[in-house]
Image (cartoon, rainbow, N blue to C red):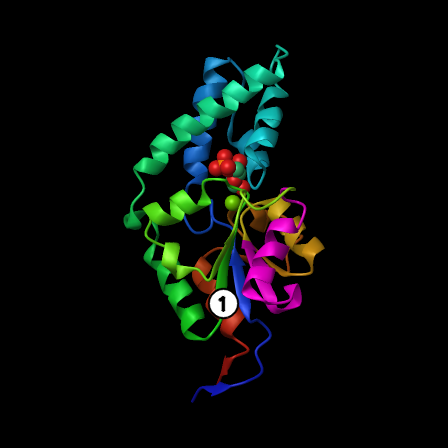
Amino acid sequence: MKKNITAKYKGVIFDLDGVIVHTDKMHYAAWKSLADRLEIPFDEEVNNRLRGVSRTESLEIILERSAQVYSDAQKLRFSEEKNESYLRYLDGLSPHDVSPEVIDTLRLLKGAGLKIAIGSSSKNAKTILKNVGLTDFFDAVSDGTNIEKTKPDPEVFLKAAAMLRLAPSECAVVEDAITGIEAAVRGGFTAIAIGNAASSNKAEFNITSISELQKIILGDIYAE
Ligand code: G6P
Ligand code: MG
C-alpha cells in the first residue's frame, strides 16, 4: 500500500528545448543553414555548446570558426535570419511532438501535488508551448523574455522558483544542457541531467528517460 511520507520536492522546473520537446533538432537545422551559407564548419559537437545558450551567444560560438569578421549589424541580421528559419520549423509543431512519456510524467507530478514550471533561455518558449498544446499545463513559465543573464547563470531557474513561490531547495531542475546543469547547481536546486548533459558528472542524477523522474521525485512521497 502507498502512504504519504514527507516530500523533499514541491516543484520541478523543466528546460524546454531538448527536454519537453525536441526543438533542439530544429535549432540545429536552422543554425546549420546559416553556417552553410556563410561557409562556416558546423556540426553536432558545436551544436552541443549552443544548448541553453542565448541566440546572440550561440551566434558568437558559431562565428568562432569563421575566417571573416562581421559587424554588429551583420550579426544582428544573421540572428534574425536564423530565428526566421527556426520559426518556420516551429510552425510545424503540434501536440504529436510531445511524447506520451513526457505527458504521462507531467500528469503524474501534477497529480501528486507538485508544481511544474518551464525554465528556458528561449524567447520562443511560449510559442512552442502554444503550438504543442502545453500552455495550460505549466504553473509558471520563466524564459528568455524575463531574464538578463542566460545559463550557466541561475537567474531563469530562480525566477521560475519565485513564480512557483518555492525555494530552490524545494525544486528539482531537469536539463539537457551542461550550462543548464551548472545553473541549477549554482542556484541551489537538485540538478537532474538528461540527454547530452547526462554525460557530465555535474548533476545529482543522470537519467536516460524522463519517466525515471517518477522514482526520483515521487520516490520519497510514495513508498511501500
Ligand atoms: C534554449 C536552447 C538554445 C537557444 C536558446 C535561445 O536555451 O537550448 O539552443 O539558443 O534557447 O532560443 P531562442 O528561441 O530565443 O533563439
Ligand atoms: Mg535544452
Q: Residue furthest top?
A: 68
Tag 1 residue:
115
Which residue is found at the position 57% from the left and 42% from the top? 52
Residue 146: horizontal and vertical position, in percent? 57, 46
Residue 145: horizontal and vertical position, in percent? 53, 43
Q: Amino acid at mark 1?
A: Lys
Location of residue 94 with respect to 173 vertically, above or below: above
- Is ligand 2 closer than 8 angstroms to the Cβ of mark 1? no
Residue 24: horizontal and vertical position, in percent? 46, 39
Crowd tier of the residue under label 1, counting other residues whose Cα lies within 10 Å: few below 14, some 14–19, many 20 or above: many
Which residue is found at the position 64% from the left and 21% from the top? 64
Left or right relative to 166: residue 211? left
Which residue is found at the position 45% from the left and 58% from the top? 210
Left or right relative to 214: residue 180? right
Quarter of the image where the N terminus is located:
bottom left
Numbered disc 1: secondary structure = strand
Residue 140: horizontal and vertical position, in percent? 49, 58
* Residue 109 magenta: no
* Residue 167 magenta: yes
Left or right relative to 129: residue 51? right
Which segment is the magenta one?
150-174
Location of residue 56 with respect to 65 vertically, above or below: below
Location of residue 10 with respect to 148 vertically, above or below: below
The count of marks equals 1
Which residue is found at the position 38% from the left and 67% from the top? 107
